[in-house]
Image (cartoon, grey):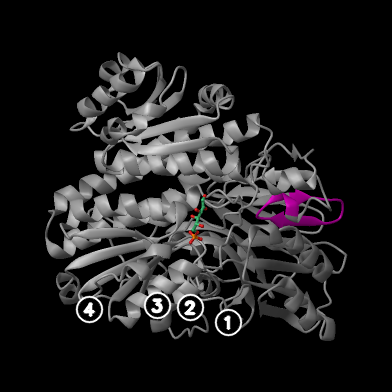
Amino acid sequence: MCGIVGYIGNRESQDILIEGLKKLEYRGYDSAGIAVFTQEGLEVRKSIGRLANLEGKLEGDPLHGSVGIGHTRWATHGKPSDANSHPHTDNSHKFSVVHNGIIENYLELKEELIAKGRHFVSETDTEVISHLIAEEYDGDIVQAVQRAVKHMRGAYALGVLTEYEPDRLVAVRFASPLVIGVGKGENFIGSDIPAILEYTRDVYILNDGEMAVLTTNAVELMTIEGEVISKEIFHVDWDLVTAEKAGFDHFMLKEIYEQPKAYRDTMMGRVSEDGRSVVLKEIGMTAEQIRGIRKVHIVACGTAFHAGLVGKTVIEGLARIPVETDVASEYRYRSPIITPDTLVIVVSQSGETADTLAALREAKRNGARVLAITNVVGSSVAREADDVIITQAGPEIAVASTKAYTSQLIAFNLFGLYLAQVLGTRDEAFVAEVLEAMHKLPEQVEAIIEQAPVLKQVADSISTHNNLFFIGRGVDFAVAQEGSLKLKEISYIHSEAYAAGELKHGTLALIEDGIPVIAVITQKDLYEKTLSNIKEVKARGAHVLGVVNAGMEEEVGKSVDELFVIPKTLQLLSPTLSVIPLQLISYYASLARGNDVDKPRNLAKSVTVE
Ligand code: F6R
């Protein structure tokens, strides 16, 4: 995820910026840059790749000056490149900006700015901001920033400098974190506390719509409307490792908590302003090409494959196109029937999984069009696919995938609705209803996460067992499979996921007294059938936890030992909620067993071998 650091004081800012950016490296990035006021004016250095590349550039050509901003970029708009790295400047090179977040309406703004004679050198949304601020400037940088942000829709944390006012550093936040570090005779900004922790432990945490104007000796806080505000200083007593995890014990837990933001970010810019349709500008397929799709193959590995299982239900349900879902390592070898009217969707968080990449190449060799759903701009999968939907989950550090999986589900729902719009299989009112329900999901995820203590209790009792079953029907079976994988990989408890109706065809023999069974039951038309399967396992002594949609608790409650109720949503969207308790149960079970949650044994984050 992108990182911001900024400094104003009396020391060489270059060193402080580089050290701050190093503290953000763990978050992942693909390029870096800094801007410093030197005697020659505002100067920028940037470089693709590791920070060492930027340091190499600075070694031969250092920037001397005591005010500067720096950035590590995780590509979202435009590939990783020197030109796309931050800081960005306007055409006069008098204004410089670093930005975290996504500007939803950047294309419209870009067109307006081009019409005013501004020219662009990057593909980023951020460059729009530097031009906007330059346009709005009439002698006061604070007012220029306040006016500029009024044009912007989306999420932003900004650090802004102008050569016209070299004694001020402006910071502003909306829906993307930003902190102000207060020092003695020097002040700092950081997207995250680790960036500035070496220099100060006193910080102001900006809220949405707030900004700060930093000078060497003062920090002035105000709203973007210009109203002066005061804030308590937050004294950070975390060590660096705790600060990297934003105070969470593990990256996995942090990433589970980041899911509401990942949902919002993945939807951002992809829904029309009136909320009634999906806008996927990144899809290059024409309506005619979409109408020509006869079948869809979804290909992926592990958790991404489980997202594909949900994707199958979504696409078949919304667009009425037949979908096959394959594990990537099997796909090529089963001699799949791939024709030019097949759309192959590859799903990969990293975009580098060898089997998924090989499947993509096989699909292309056979003349199919390939759509990639991936979290990494510029990854191999993203580069080689015909169309790419980037899930805006931000870098995932824990080996066990959580926020990447759920943002893949969001991407599938957006794509399914998009197909339905083009094909006319669903009307506008239906699409609007689903989008409205999707907008509610982030808050509903938060409500589930608030129940973490209850799930910890469930996990503590599960952690003493060596075997466990997950059951479900339809899309609940897909979620059960993800729940089972999550539990296995980090708690090392053996578990299996079964289509609930399939148990009695053999596996029921394994059910014995006290064995835990987790039943996912969110589909109204199927729950009665699952209840009879629950009776089968209960009759053999199983202890059953039911994960159910609100409204089903009374009916299901009679048949299970414990209940966890997820907030009410459309059936189609229930996997985006029902998986959250399963993630938390896995996390706490792993913790109870004293395992290395973030780095489970024998596993790697990116699997680049077949
Ligand atoms: C499990 C997990 C893996 C990955 C799989 C594919 O939590 O993360 O199962 O989903 O290795 O990885 P990507 O999505 O990078 O292709």
- Residue located beneath label 2 in the image: 123
At x 21%, y 28%, the residue is: 529
Please report whichever mark, 2 or 1, sits nearer to the chain's N-terminal start.
1
Disc 2 to disc 1, C-alpha distance = 8 Å
**Label 4 with label 3: CB-CB less than 8 Å:** no
Disc 2 to disc 3, C-alpha distance = 27 Å
Relative placement, left or right, of 8 versus 92 is: right
Please report whichever mark, 4 or 3, sits nearer to the chain's N-terminal start.
4
Mark 4 sits near ligand 1, with its Cβ under 8 Å away: no
- Residue located beneath label 4 in the image: 340
Q: Is residue 192 above or below residue 557?
A: below
Q: Position of residue 293 (x, y in %)?
A: 18, 70
Please report whichever mark, 4 or 1, sits nearer to the chain's N-terminal start.
1
Relative placement, left or right, of 243 versus 438 is: right
Where does the N terminus fall, quadrant-wise?
Answer: bottom right
- Residue located beneath label 1 in the image: 83
Q: Is residue 121 above or below residue 547?
A: below
Residue type at numbered disc 2? Glu
Residue type at numbered disc 4? Pro
